[in-house]
Image (cartoon, rainbow, N blue to C red):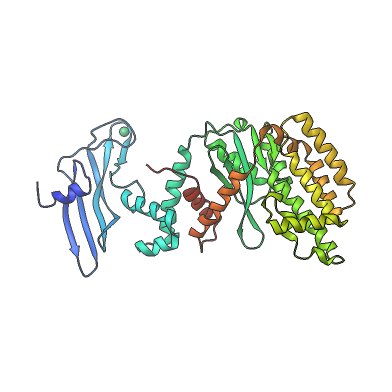
Amino acid sequence: MDEYSLFTIALGLKKPWKVADVKFSKDEGRLDLKIDFQKGAAFPCPSCEEGRCPIHDTRERAWRHLNFFQYETYLHARVPRVRCGRCGIRQVEVPWARSGSGFTLLFELLVLQLCREMSVAGVGALVGEHTNRIWRILEHYVERARRRIDLSSFHILGIDEFSVRKGHEYMTSFSDIDASRVVFTGESRRKEVIEEFSDDMKERGYDLRDIDLICCDMWDPYLNGIEKHIPGASVVFDRFHIMKQMNKAIEKVRWAEQKENKDLKKTRFIWLKNPKNLTEKQSEQLTELKKLDLKTARAYQIKLALSRFWEIREPNEAEHYLTKWFFWATHSRLDPVIEVARGIKRYWQGVLNYTLSRITNGVVEGLNSKIKTAMKRAYGFKHTQYLRTIVYLVVDKLCFD
Ligand SMILES: [Zn+2]
């Protein structure tokens, strides 16, 4: 035991490393620990199995460590380069930091934990480091953790857009619906994002033929990309997205009709809500409105009929029902409704595929709302790579061991 043994133990250093000197500067508010190796030490080669290589030379390095109370703490050491009989001159790895980083592992771990809870700018200010350095730490660990994710049970893919900023800038999330995790985020909602996704997955050793089902919106750029890069999967259109379009159609019909019929004013929610969720007063109002010969009421009936389609579980029956519904909807003389029906006709098989698969993008919508929260942590940083890193960090359940 020497006077610095306690520091050696506190840092968890093992032979041949030990704390050799401690400098404490109250005025500068910092603590500097000099680490050194014992005389005559030999080190393992970082590239091969060779356990004891002689030292060739050393280089002075410094790392930021966890603060000691309010004092910024730095480790200093001369890092040896060894001469390996097989590999030549190699720099050894120090146990307290990864190579190339100016921070110790514990400091980086602290940064990762903080960034899960607060904004990157906030973390930078808190620890007194430039945010670029914080981003570099995040990117390193996030990428490493993503490479380690086990994708062997990933078979159902959910694709959905999310808006990045107010205006019309979108990105696309790709999720493993069963595992409820975002596996990739693409930089736009153009068809190229499917290729970006495909490249990333291949790099991670995943075979895209393992995807059986894809749930997404009726959005041609996605569909074109899917056809090209994931042709073996069946596409299922998200029923909630289709119902949302139907609701928009009702709203358009009502909007036009209320100009002549004042009874329709302030009835928007009555037509959009699920009948089960109406208050007693709203139900009565709906019954009264239905007695009038309203276009809005007709559109509403067509919507209710479409919502019954999702309950059918037998494929032939489902197709028969949807065919009848399509006929009714296209003969309704309500343009917005006809438009929705034609959309369904265009994407017929993907709509019918719901009957057997029963999958929706409910999970994905949940993940996308987490993405929105996550993006606040990247507030002030415009680069999409930053947004992706923060999404993976906060939403992707990554584990950093
Ligand atoms: Zn070697």
Q: Position of residue 225 (x, y in %)?
A: 69, 41
Residue 36 is at least partly visible in this image: no
**Numbered circles on residues, count:** 0
Please indicate whether residue 175 sits to the left or right of residue 108 in the image: right
Q: Position of residue 40 (x, y in %)?
A: 15, 40
Please indicate whether residue 314 sits to the left or right of residue 32 in the image: right
Q: Nearer the viewer, residue 112 or 40?
A: 112
Q: Please tell me which residue is depicted at 24% across the width and 66% down the height of the picture.
A: 29
Q: Residue furthest bottom?
A: 27
Please indicate whether residue 290 sits to the left or right of residue 394 in the image: right
Q: Nearer the viewer, residue 110 or 367?
A: 367
Please indicate whether residue 51 sits to the left or right of residue 337 in the image: left
Q: Position of residue 151 (x, y in %)?
A: 52, 34
Q: Position of residue 212 (x, y in %)?
A: 64, 31
Query: Where ligand 1 lies, by quadrant?
Result: top left
Q: Please tell me which residue is depicted at 18% across the width and 51% down the height of the picture.
A: 7
Residue 278 is at least partly visible in this image: yes
Q: Nearer the viewer, residue 384 or 258?
A: 258
Q: Please tell me which residue is depicted at 60% across the width and 36% down the height of the picture.
A: 156
| Rendered view: 194 above or below 115 | above
Q: Nearer the viewer, residue 80 or 193?
A: 193
The quarter of the picture where residue 287 lies is bottom right
Which quarter of the rendered picture does the C terminus lie within?
A: top left
Q: Please tell me which residue is depicted at 44% across the width and 59% down the height of the picture.
A: 120
